[in-house]
Every structure is written in structure tokens, then in C-alpha cells.
Image (cartoon, grey):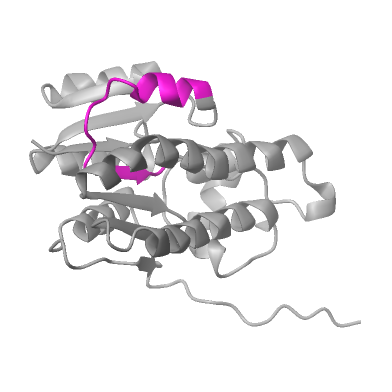
Amino acid sequence: MQRVVVTGATSGFGRAAVRRFHALGYDVVGTGRRQERLDELAAELGERFTGLCFDVSDRAACEHALADVGDVDILVNNAGLALGLEPAWQANLDDWLTMVKVNIEGVLYLTRTLLPGMVARQTGHIVNVSSMAASWPYPGSNVYGASKAFVSQFTMNLRCDLVGTRVRMTSIEPGLCETEFSLVRFKGDESAAKNPYADVEAMTADDIAESIVWATQQPRHVNINRIELMATEQAWGPFNIHRE
């Protein structure tokens, strides 16, 4: 039975991906910081689901939690967050550092822990959840966009290293998607969190999970390098020009 590890499994893309992989018959390991959410998934899914409660930005915790997880066929580095939408000079430095630790360091720790086993077995797939902000900056995306640009570029650089190992790499880069993402970004302010989705049909967590799972189900000789997807009513804006 194939095993998949999904980080950030307690909400949004991660939770939806856990359900989809489980429905396909995978042995699913979901990680997150909220034990009660992991317990809910365990009660819902029953057999073939294991919840591991730890913070991906804690290197020692990652290594300890994954030490006995066994052979992993698919790793979905989904855990990540945005904090704040202020211009750079008004942003909270602690928020910047948190985004770097979770969005970048978390991906590094999980990847470096599980990748050697994939290479040794000559099989595996790592899916990194990035963002359209990696390629298309917007006001207030300063460190969030930069951290996701790292994730996208790291994915492509690993592709180069992994040629000849049969290990695949994919970057998933979503745009406007209605999840708890904005609630986290605005630190629980429900009114502010609803604004990005007002009067538009945003994508859903299931839409993104479908892309994640689809990329992993292609024949072994096919590598899906990158999927960028947006809501139909979203596109790139004009250049931002300040006029006196």
C-alpha cells in the first residue's frame, strides 16, 4: 500500500487532499498543529489515516515525528501561511520571520527528511504547494510572495538534482481560493477575511486538492512540473503606476 504524507492537514488544501488520497486507497499521514482537528479526521476516515501533531518549522519535531513513519511514496508540502497585508515598511517583522520559518524552513525540513528514502528506492513524488504570488506580486505580498517564490524555485532546482532517480517534483500555484487562509492572514478578523472573496466565485480547497492528486496519478515517466490556477474571474492586473 502506498503512503502519502500531507502537511497542513487540519484545514483547507491539506484536509481536502487527505480525504482524496484516502478515498483512492492510500495510507495517509496528515500533519498539523491542532490535535483536535487531526482527531476529527481520524474519526472520519478510520483505518489508513494517522495524525501527527507538530510544527513543521521546528526541525527537531519534524525529524522526531517522521522517524518511524516508514517508506513514503508521496510528500505534499502544503503547510504554509500569509500574515498581514501591510506595505513593507509597516509590516510586523515577527510576521515576516514566521512566514519564512513555516513557508520555507518547513518545506526544507520535510523534504530533506523524506527525500533520501525516495532516492534510495528510486521512486517517489514531492508536491510543493506554492502560490500565484510566487510569479505575480501584488501590494502587501512582500515576504509571503517571496517565500512562495522560493518554494517554486526550490521545486525546479530539485527537479534538476533528481534526474535519473525516478523521483518526481511538482509545484502547485493557486490564486484566489476561499479557505481559512485569509482568516489566518488577518489574525481572526472575520470581516477582513471575507473581503477578498466578496462578489466573486473563488476556487475551493477541493479544486486545489484535485490538482494535487491529479499530478501524482500520471504515469511514472510523466512529471508535471508546475500547475498555476486561478478563479475564472481573476487575472493579472495592469501595472501599478503612481501619478502625481
- Horizontal side of 6 relative to 62 (left or right) equals left
The quarter of the rendered structure image containing the C terminus is: bottom right
Which quarter of the figure has residue 138? Answer: bottom right
Which residue is at 47% across, 21% downward? 61
The quarter of the rendered structure image containing the N terminus is: top left
Q: Depth check: give the residue in front, 183 or 78.
A: 78
Q: Depth check: give the residue in front, 20 or 153.
A: 153
Whole-percent x, y for residue 36 in the image: 36, 17
- Horizontal side of 193 relative to 141 (left or right) equals left
Whole-percent x, y for residue 79 in the image: 44, 39
In this rendering, does residue 54 appear at all?
no
Total count of labels: 0
- Specify whether residue 4 is painted magenta: no
In this rendering, does residue 42 appear at all?
yes
- Horizontal side of 97 relative to 190 (left or right) equals right
Which residue is at 55% across, 62% downward? 133
Q: Is residue 59 above or below residue 105?
A: above
Whole-percent x, y for residue 18 in the image: 24, 38
Which residue is at 21% across, 33% downward? 71
The span shown in magenta is 60-78
